[in-house]
Image: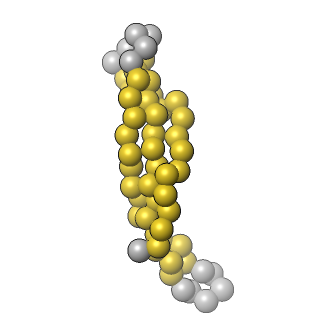
Amino acid sequence: MNGENGSAIITFEETMTSLANGQKERSAIMVEVFLQKEGSKWLVNRFRQVNAEPI
């Protein structure tokens, strides 16, 4: 391991549907991913949610 580190911000769009009434809720989830390089591969070693808001 050479100790290289990095991070990235990723945004996901999520749709949840209520089974009770079929109503859909959409939201955007923003996550910061912390990476560590091992050999030629970048591995996620932790992450944290930065934000979540309805769209």
Residue 9 spot, x, y in % from top left: 38, 45
Residue 37 locus on image (x, y percent):
40, 21
Q: Residue at x 41, y 23 (%)?
A: 5
Q: Residue at x 50, y 62 (%)?
A: 52
Query: Does residue 47 appear to the left or right of 13 in the view shown?
Result: right
Most extreme residue toward the bottom, as rendered? 21
Q: Quadrant of the N terminus?
A: top left
Of residues 22 and 1, the one drawn nearer to the viewer in this rendering = 1
Q: What is the residue that sits farthest to the left in this orientation?
A: 40
Residue found at x 48% / y 68%: 53
Residue 25 location in percent, x, y? 50, 78
- Outermost residue to the top: 2
Determine which quarter of the picture holds residue 6.
Answer: top left
Can you say whether 24 is above or below 6 in the image?
below
Q: Would residue 45 be found to the left or right of residue 20 on screen?
A: left
Query: From what the image shows, is residue 13 above or below residue 48?
Result: below
Q: Is residue 48 above or below residue 25?
A: above
Instruction: Tell me if I can see residue 14 in this picture.
Output: no
Q: Is residue 25 visible?
A: yes
